[in-house]
Image: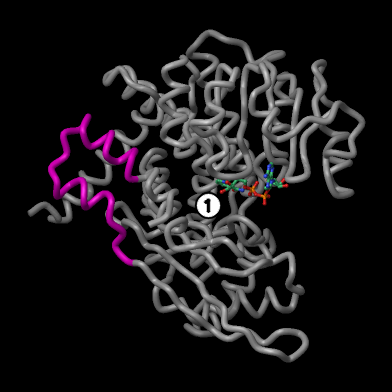
Amino acid sequence: MSEIFDNVTSYVNKVSGIMKLSPFEKELIHTPNRVIQVSFPLEMDDNSKRVITAYRVQFNNARGPYKGGIRFHHHVNMGEVKALAFWMAIKCAVVDIPFGGGKGGVVINPKELSHGEIERISRGFMRAMHQFLGPDVDIPAPDVYTTSQVMDWMRDEYEKITKTSSPAVITGKSLKNGGSLVRDVSTALGGAMVLRELMAEKKLTMKDASVAVQGFGNAGQNMAKILDSWGCKVVAVSDSKGGIYNKAGLDIGAVIREKEKGTVTTFDAESISNEYLLELDVDVLVPAALADVITGKNASGIKAKVVLELANGPTSPEADRILSKAGVIILPDVLANAGGVTVSYFEWKQNKLGKSWSEEKITEELDKTMKSAFKSVSSMAMTHDTDFRTAAYILAIGRILEAEKSKGSEP
Ligand code: NAD
């Protein structure tokens, strides 16, 4: 069992105590419906052959088809995929969209592979997995190191195998191939909307709120851009090579141009480490890169008033306890980064209806969804006198168990 799935167990134990779940209900919530491991051959550009291993975990589909990304990473393992699939089930229930939770992973290092090799892996994955997937069964999407191009190849392979037209089998596709407007910025935009709701509830202003963002990829870069345009002062950002800091606020447009050349670290500003960035005295800290970066070791050094979790699982349970005790407000991943899957749902819906929605309509629908999810989580936190993460889990687990009950899953 991986450490990251231990984090899931720890949160489920805490919440099942509060909700007074029966041992059966707790096990139902904590056990994946199906765990799939496949392997398939890959022909490399030099004509040599390799065997590729891939995983898909279908955690729970009581509320609708399984939904979740596919990650290409050399360190991906079954425990991690299981934890991420569980979080997808919770996330979809928090924002109340009719999907369950799933996740996939392929054990490869995409940085070492050619464009052609990545295409053959994408198609190989679909050939090995297609019988478990489908527009009303399990709908994958992009995740770390998988792009809209990868989704386009996978859709094409699925349609060739099934001899169907099935745009809704996968989301995060390119715009010309059934993708949706706003999908590329949706995770960050949804997170920014949740932050805006929190600030309004606490009677705080976004204007000049200082922000540090760890990770400058899709999620982190768009978050820095959006918060900068909403009047916040983004004082620090980082990527895998390190971070940069300017107390007066960074010129985010210029930092993005610098990142396009390789890394943010060559930008003209004070250099800082990724560890130091986490401990800056800012109003809002946004972990937007890796899991488990705020741990028992560094939690007491965190000075931010609000932690907005765009990454999945950036805070360990021990750190969560330390931060909550210190009065730091955590906007948990299962709420803060749910904008991505919400717009994936809109893409799936557009594909099913054979329609394309405008940017205005999607943004408006996303806003409604995130506002309503924040309100539900906040009012659950008030009812149970608890933090937002615990409240989000109570809300989601309650909704999943209700769906299980209506299916007759109770003994
Ligand atoms: P990405 O691959 O586009 O970007 C990741 C960024 O993190 C890069 O800038 C990279 O340089 C940086 N990074 C890598 N190692 C680092 C380190 N040690 N310290 C600091 N930065 C480091 O990925 P993404 O899509 O932006 O995803 C980031 C996180 O957000 C992941 O945890 C992902 O699961 C989560 N997330 C993303 C989405 C989405 O729609 N993109 C949705 C939900 C959750």
Which residue occupies 89% across, 49% down? 261
Residue 333 in the magenta stretch? The answer is no
What amino acid type should be assigned to the residue bearing mark 1? Ser
Left or right position of 44 against 396: right
Label 1 sits on residue: 344
- Image spot of residue 148 (x, y percent): 66, 61
Residue 147 % position (x, y): 66, 61
Residue under the image location 60 percent in, 29 percent down = 192
- Mark 1 C-beta closer than 8 Å to ligand 1: no
146 in relation to 86, above or below: below
Identify the coloring.
one colour
**Magenta: main secondary structure:** helix
Q: Residue furthest bottom?
A: 47
Q: Quadrant of residue 247?
A: top right
Asked whether 205 or 15 is in front, the reply is: 15
The local secondary structure at tag 1 comes to helix
> Which residue is painted at 42% across and 32% down in the image?
318
Q: Is residue 289 left or right of residue 38?
A: right
Q: Foreground residue, 390 or 135?
A: 390
Q: Is residue 381 visible in the rendered structure shown here?
A: yes
* Direction top: furthest residue: 203
Residue 81 picture location, percent across and down: 46, 58
Question: How crowded is the residue under tag 1: few (<14 C-alpha within 10 Å), some, or many (20+)?
Answer: many
Q: Does residue 72 show up?
A: no
Q: Is residue 368 left or right of residue 251?
A: left
Residue extent of the magenta highlight: 9-34
* Residue ID at (50%, 72%): 54
| In-front residue for pair 290/352 | 290
Q: Was residue 19 drawn as part of the magenta stretch in this picture?
A: yes
